Image (cartoon, rainbow, N blue to C red):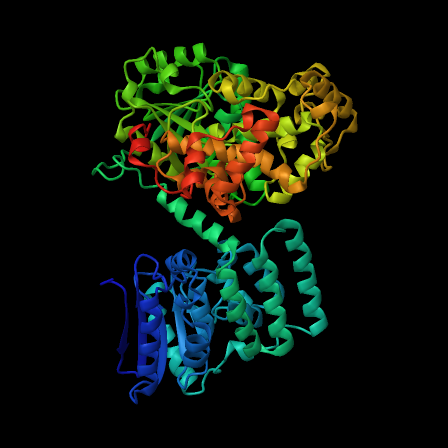
Amino acid sequence: MGGVKVTMEVGSDGVAVITIFNPPVNALAIPIIAGLKEKWTEATMRNDVKAIVLTGNGGRFSGGFDINVFQKVHGTGDISQMPDVSVDLVVNTMEDGKKPAVAAIEGLALGGGLELALGCHARIAAPRAQLGLPELSLGVMPGFGGTQRLPRLIGLSKAVEMMMTSKPIMSEEGKKLGLIDAIAPSSELLKVSRQWALDIAERRKPWMRSLHKTDKIGSLSEAREVLKVARQQVKQTVKNMPQHLACIDVVEDGIIHGGYHGVLKEAKVFKDLVLSDTSKGLVHVFFAQRATSKVPFVTDIGLKPRTVKKVAVIGGGLMGSGIATALALSNTFVVLKEINSEYLQKGMKAIEENVRGLVARKKLPQGKADKALSMVKGALGYSDFKDVDVVIEAVIENIPLKQKIFSEIEKVCPPHCILASNTSTIDLNVIGENTRSKDRIIGAHFFSPAHIMPLLEIVRTEKTSAQAILDLMAVGKAIKKVPVVVGNCTGFAVNRTFFPYAQGAHILANLGVDVYRIDAQITNFGLPMGPFQLQDLTGYGVAVAVGKEFGSAFSDRTFKSPLINLLIKSGRNGKNNGKGYYIYEKGRKPRPDFTVLPIIEESRRLTNVMPGGKPISVTDQEIVEMILFPVVNEACRVLDEGIVVRASDLDVASVLGMSFPSYRGGIVFWADTVGAGRIYRSLKKWSELYGNFFKPSRFLEERATKGIPLSAPASTSSASRSRI
C-alpha cells in the first residue's frame, strides 16, 4: 500500500492542495478516505490555510469508491466495513467545513470521486474530463450524497438520467449544466482552482453548498412528474433490479424533506443495497471480467503480444462481415475474401451497413465511419495474404470446406500468422487435421452480431502456442471484446454449456407446456427473450445443424424433438420469412402465431412423452428450473473437464455470450445461490420421471453431497484431466 496516500501542500498563497494518490485511477480505498478526513481536519485547523483545493495525482481525479470493499462485505456479510463517508466526511468535514474547497478535476471523476467533488464549493475541470455516477451498474446507488447534490446542481431530469443509465458526461456538457464552474487547460488547472478557492474565501465568488440549492429542482408537482416518468421507464427496462427504484425513492425523499434528510436516507438505503443479491451478482461479474485476462502459462510467462496490423477474414456472410466490421472500427487493415464477386459485393455491403447503422444510432461519428470503411479491402484470391498477421475463417459449418481452407492458408500466409476459425461447434483438431502448423491453429469464436456482441471465445487445442493465445487476446481487447480463453470440445464453453437450454424448452413443450408461457417465464427471469423466440431469430437451419453436432457428441443426454423439422416442413423459418412461433412484421413487436399450435400438437403426438397422454402441471418457477438446471448440469461437466480456467470465466461468458442476466452473477454464481443440493435433487427427480436428459452429472452429485460450492476450484484429480 506504499503508493496509497493523501498528501497536503500549503502554498504561500494560503491554499492547501490535498492530493489523492492511489494509481491507476485514485480509487477511494479505506486508507484514502481516512487520509482525506485527516488532511481536511488539519487544513481547517491551520491558521496559514485560507482555502482548500482537492485533486488527484497522475491526471485523474478519482475513479470512485474501492469496489474491493464491496467484495469483502459480500464475503463476510459485515456491513460495518463500509466507512461513513457521506455524513462524516462529505457533509460535516467538507461541505459544512469552515474553509472553502474547490475540486480540480482532470481525467475522470466517477462515482464517489464525483460525489467528493459535489461536496466541494466549486468545481474546475480540464477539457474532456469524464463525470458520472455509475453506481447502479454495480447494484447499489450513489452513497456519498450524489442522489441529493447532483439534482440540485444540474436539474432533476438530467441527474436522474445520469444515475439511471450510469453513463458519464464530458466536462464541457457539465459546464453548460452547472455541474462545472469553469474549464481550464490541464497546465493551468491548479492555478485557476487555487485562485477560485481564494476568491470564495474572500467573498469575491459565492460560497455555495450544493445540498442547500433548490432553484433547479422546480416545484414539487413538477419534480413528482419527472420521477413518475422515470419509475415507469425503470419498470419496463430493468424490472428485476431493486437499485433503480430505490435510488428514485431516495431522490424524492430529499426533495420533499430537504437535502440533509435525503443524505441520511441515502446512507441507510445504500447499505441495504450493498447486501442485496443484485449487488453481489453485479460485483462478482465486474471482478470475474477482470480475471479473464489472467491465463496461467500464457499471461504469466514473460511473453509480449506481437503487433497485429493486418487481418484477413474468409467469408463475408453474417459472421464474417461482422468480424471484419469490428476489426475495421479498431483501425486494423482487413482483407475480406470471398469465392466470387457476387458474394464479395454482398459482404462489403454488409460491412458498410453495419458501420452506417452505428452512425445512424449516434454510436459512431461520420469521420470515424469513413476511416473504418477505408480499412477494408475485398479479395477473391490469396495474393493479399502474404503479409497478414491473423486469418479468421468464418465460412459455413462444413468440415471438408474448413479443412481445405486451412491447408490453403498455411501455404500462403507468413510463418508467424495465426490461423483462426470462427467455428461455433466443430472440434479444432478436426479442422486443422491436414496442416503442419498445429501450434498456430486457434478458435476465434465471435457471437452474432459480431461487431456488437462483447464476447470472444478464444479456443485452444493442446498444441496451440501460448504466443498465439496471447496475440489473439490482444486482438480481442483492441476490438473492444472481452476475450475468454477456453478448451477445445464440441461447442466449447458457451454453446456446450447452453445446448440443454433449447432442449429443455422442447421437452417442456412436448410434455404439454404452452410455448408462450415458457418464453414469458424465461424473460421474467431476466433473459432478453425466451428459447422459442430465440430459435425464430437464429433460424431453424442453425437449430438443426447445431442439434446434429450435439446429438452425436452427447447422445446419452440429448432430447430429439421433431418440432423444428415439422415447422420447416410447414414452410416456416422463423424471423427469416416472418413465420415461426411468432409473427414478424416490420415496425411491430413479434406476436404469438396461434396457427403454430396444431404443429406443436403433432410433435407431442410423435414424441408421446406426456404421462398418460395428458399435459404435465408445472409452476412458473419449475418452468425456469427445468430449462436452466440442465444448463447448470452441463456447466458442471465443463468445469469438471477443465474446459475453462476458472468458474467465473463461465459466468462472464454466459453473461456476455448468452445474455444471462448480469445481476444474477452468471450461470455458476446463480447456481451457487440456488444451491447444488437443490439442483441435484430436482434433476434426479425429473430424470426418474422424464429420462436421461435430466440425469445429474457426477461433478454435481459430488458437490451436492459434500456441500461444496460449484464455483470452488476443482480437485487435483479433476485438474489433471484439464484441457486448458
As rendered, which of 519 and 691 lies closer to the eye? Answer: 691
Q: Is residue 56 left or right of residue 267?
A: left
Which residue extends farthest left?
302
Residue 666 percent across, percent down from the top left: 48, 43
* Residue 48 at least partly seen: yes
Q: Nearer the viewer, residue 233 or 319?
A: 233
Asked if 441 appears above or below 61 in the picture, the reply is above
Residue at 70% x, 19% y is 603
Locate residue 37: give its quadrant: bottom left
The answer to whether 563 appears left or right of 625 in the picture is: right
Quarter of the image where the C terminus is located:
top left
Across the whole image, how many numbered discs are drawn on residues? Answer: 0
> Where residue 671 sits: x, y (%)?
49, 42
Residue at (24, 37) in percent of width and height: 304
Q: In the rendered image, which quarter contains the N terminus? A: bottom left
Tell me: residue 659, above or below residue 221: above
Residue at the image position 41 percent from the left and 80 percent from the top:
93
Q: Is residue 529 visible?
A: no
Residue at 29% x, 24% y: name it.
464
**Residue 623: quadrant of the picture:** top right
Task: Report x, y in % for residue 396.
Answer: 50, 17
Q: Nearer the viewer, residue 425 or 443?
A: 425
176 lies left or right of 31? right
Residue sitting farthest toward the bottom: 47
Q: Position of residue 552 (x, y in %)?
A: 49, 15
